[in-house]
């Protein structure tokens, strides 16, 4: 996931959703249960719903499904992913076996990528040599200017020394593509990893320095030289972290929008970087750039001026190798895993090579795989059924806006206008990406990844100066995820997210479907258009204030209640959820639930009120919502997420929003004194 620019569509992990056959939803067509119930079978009856609904709804499954050693977390999302892996493996192996695939065809690219990615012997034979060209250019760095030459070259390969950049929609002019510059250059997940004093984080910092030392040793340095290089690179990154904005501040689109001419950026903040000529080196003739954090670039200028060339070389070597280690020989691959997999996320061992190959195949040529995937596994009828569910949620949302007692008629009219303009993208793109200029061969795994990354970056750059293509997707159809893009005012729902392993659509009742699709996905994504960040964009996707001053103040007052609620949660001793950084996701979870309830109450199942597996329709709605977050994670990954992710951990994405929902209290008879109960004046009341 890209975790830099706020205008990039946020990858909102939804982790679970509809059928193995990936079909649609039929109101009132659930067949009699001939297998364990889709939600009741997961329930831990030793836990009271009002004490801990997440454990009540999911506890039995979690107890009987420990985290496998190769995983950092385990839940419905990973089970779905395993089903996807099996399907994508077949596609890849079939392509590799096709000896008559035409050069440049989908089958040729998939087959050659897969064959080379699976060739461990070839990777071991080549070692680090696929990177020799870039390593030689780094060796030639002797001053700031030559360091910048290589830094800008590495950006095209997906390596981000010093800063991040992208070409994407101008937040205040959504019909134009703009150059964005953003803070970056860190090897640890987020700036606070360099400063947080919690003992687990301190251990990660120490392990990172040891990791760097081993990398430098593998690149030919003596033990003493490697140790010194690692220490100096860590000092440089710590200095970069110190001038970086905290995670919560990166969610303010106004503060992160600083438009200026490249010459102004050079003169005012970075005299060492001639941005006009640097951008022209990428064939970008941009009269303006949007700078996320000007003070970061000012600090970067000072750091570049005082950092010796040998340290700059080591810093770029480390970032290049860490970016491509997974595609090199086993020694580099294992070293990278030891820190980023084992230390940061708690994995005991690597996933099988074929799964890792598929992960990167998805990253490199995912849309090529996607064309075949949807043809084999997602029907046009399914696409239309979920389109219909989006409209049901849109209708319910509009009705809820009309009933709000805290929003003025003027702001309501604008909100309804924005809601009506939300574009839905369901299943897969109507128009596929053109990969004709991408070369995939059998020279090396790393070379294929470099080719794919360079192609993706140059394709992104080529969009500058052209009309915005609002038909593009930022996710592949085989992704169990979804996102809202504020600049397009769109929700994007890939085909793979409509999966529950082992169940077909007509075996899942509407109550469950409305919980885990309508609420946790569709309603969630639409609500992102009205969360603390998304609400600042208008119906056309422009960053503009369409709220009355009084309504904005009332919104903030209500949102602050949610910030306070989540700040109080302490999943690990000494580390609380960051209520400010996670506010948008928490609002979207809460809004999705409220809108999902409204839509569900219009269904025949709700109106009939009949129990299934001993639970009422409304109870099954909430169990369906909890099913979407059926997951457990290792302490290491929990720590990483708390410090670097804008999403709260799974358990709190269930218990947190539900403790504000009146229908939940009624459905499970939650009483005062139970942990899930919140006093009326402390409950969130937004959408």
Image (tube, grey):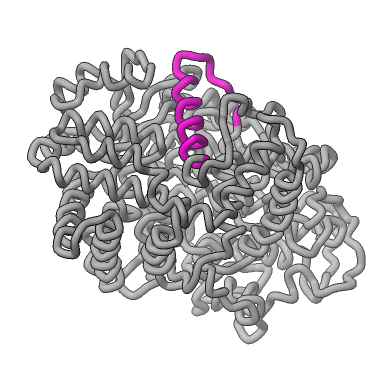
Residue 465 magenta-drawn? yes
* Residue at image point 86% right, 52% down: 27
Above-or-below relation of 368 to 565? above
Q: Is residue 287 visible?
A: yes
From the top left corner, tell me how far across and down residue 371 is, in percent: 72, 37
Magenta-highlighted residues: 448-472
* Residue at image point 45% right, 30% down: 457
Above-or-below relation of 47 to 149? below
From the top left corner, tell me how far across and down residue 613 is, in percent: 81, 74
Q: Is residue 594 visible?
A: no
* Residue at image point 49% right, 35% down: 451
**Which residue lies most toward the front here?**
125
Residue in the foreground of this view, choosing between 391 and 123: 123
Above-or-below relation of 319 to 617? above
Indicate left or right for 209 with 630 as reference: left
Counting labels gives 0
Secondary structure that dominates the magenta span: helix
From the top left corner, tell me how far across and down residue 368 is, in percent: 66, 37
Indicate left or right for 32 with 437 as reference: right
Indicate left or right for 111 with 179 as reference: right
From the top left corner, tell me how far across and down residue 155 is, in percent: 36, 34
Residue in the foreground of this view, choosing between 90 and 344: 90
Residue 295 falls in image quadrant? top left
Indicate left or right for 418 with 196 as reference: right
* Residue at image point 43% right, 70% down: 346
Residue 223 magenta-drawn? no
**Which residue lies most toward the bottom here?**
46
Residue 74 falls in image quadrant? bottom right
């Amino acid at each position: 996931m890209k975790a830099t620019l706020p205008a990039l569509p946020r990858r909102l992990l939804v982790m679970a959703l509809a059928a193995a056959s990936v079909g649609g939803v039929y109101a009132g067509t659930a067949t009699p249960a001939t297998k364990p119930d889709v939600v009741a079978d997961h329930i831990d009856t030793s836990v009271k719903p009002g004490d801990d609904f997440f454990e009540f709804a999911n506890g039995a499954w979690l107890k009987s499904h420990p985290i496998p050693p190769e995983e950092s977390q385990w839940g419905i999302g990973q089970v779905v992913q395993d089903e996807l892996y099996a399907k994508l493996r077949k596609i890849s192996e079939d392509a590799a076996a096709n000896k008559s695939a035409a050069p440049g065809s989908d089958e040729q690219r998939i087959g050659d990528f897969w064959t080379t990615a699976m060739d461990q012997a070839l990777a071991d034979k080549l070692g680090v040599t696929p990177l020799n060209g870039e390593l030689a250019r780094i060796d030639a760095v002797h001053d700031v200017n030559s360091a910048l030459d290589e830094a800008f070259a590495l950006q095209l390969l997906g390596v981000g020394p010093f800063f991040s950049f992208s070409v994407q929609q101008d937040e205040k002019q959504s019909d134009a593509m703009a150059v964005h510059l953003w803070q970056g250059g860190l090897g640890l997940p987020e700036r606070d990893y360099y400063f947080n004093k919690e003992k687990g984080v301190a251990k990660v910092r120490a392990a990172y320095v040891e990791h760097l030392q081993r990398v430098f040793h593998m690149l030919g340095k003596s033990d003493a030289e490697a140790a010194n290089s690692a220490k100096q690179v860590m000092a440089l990154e710590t200095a970069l972290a110190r001038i970086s904005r905290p995670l919560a501040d990166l969610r303010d689109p106004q503060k992160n929008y600083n438009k200026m001419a490249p010459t102004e950026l050079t003169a005012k903040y970075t005299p060492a970087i001639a941005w006009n000529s640097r951008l022209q080196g990428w064939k970008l003739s941009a009269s303006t750039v949007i700078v996320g954090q000007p003070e970061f670039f000012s600090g970067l200028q000072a750091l570049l001026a005082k950092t010796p060339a040998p340290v700059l070389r080591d810093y770029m070597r480390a970032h290049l190798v860490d970016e491509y280690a997974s595609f090199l020989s086993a020694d580099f691959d294992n070293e990278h895993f030891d820190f980023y997999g084992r230390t940061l996320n708690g994995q005991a061992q690597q996933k099988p090579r074929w799964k890792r190959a598929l992960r990167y195949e998805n990253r490199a040529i995912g849309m090529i795989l996607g064309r075949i995937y949807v043809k084999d596994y997602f029907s046009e009828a399914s696409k239309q059924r979920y389109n219909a569910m989006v409209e049901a949620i849109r209708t319910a949302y509009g009705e809820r806006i009309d009933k709000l007692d805290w929003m003025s008629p003027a702001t309501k009219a604008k909100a309804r206008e924005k809601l009506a303009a939300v574009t839905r993208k369901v299943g897969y793109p109507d128009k596929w990406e053109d990969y004709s200029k991408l070369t995939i061969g059998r020279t090396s795994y790393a070379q294929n990844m470099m080719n794919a990354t360079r192609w993706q970056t140059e394709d992104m750059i080529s969009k500058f100066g052209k009309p915005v293509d609002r038909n593009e997707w930022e996710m592949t159809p085989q992704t169990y995820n979804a996102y809202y893009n504020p600049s397009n005012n769109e929700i994007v729902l890939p085909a793979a997210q409509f999966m529950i392993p082992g169940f077909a659509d007509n075996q899942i009742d509407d109550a469950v479907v409305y919980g885990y699709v309508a609420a946790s996905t569709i309603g969630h994504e639409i609500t992102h258009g009205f969360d603390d960040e998304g609400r600042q964009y208008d119906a056309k996707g422009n960053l503009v204030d369409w709220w009355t001053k009084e309504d904005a103040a009332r919104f903030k007052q209500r949102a602050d209640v949610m910030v306070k609620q989540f700040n109080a949660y302490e999943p690990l001793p000494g580390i609380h959820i960051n209520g400010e950084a996670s506010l948008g996701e928490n609002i979207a979870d809460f809004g999705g639930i409220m809108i999902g309830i409204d839509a569900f109450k219009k269904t025949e199942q709700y109106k009939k009120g009949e129990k299934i597996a001993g639970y009422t329709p409304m109870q099954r709605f909430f169990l369906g919502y909890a099913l979407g977050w059926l997951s457990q994670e290792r302490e290491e990954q929990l720590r990483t997420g708390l410090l670097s992710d804008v999403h709260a951990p799974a358990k709190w994405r269930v218990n947190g929003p539900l403790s504000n929902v009146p229908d939940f209290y009624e459905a499970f008879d939650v009483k005062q004194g139970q942990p899930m109960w919140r006093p009326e004046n402390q409950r969130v009341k937004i959408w």
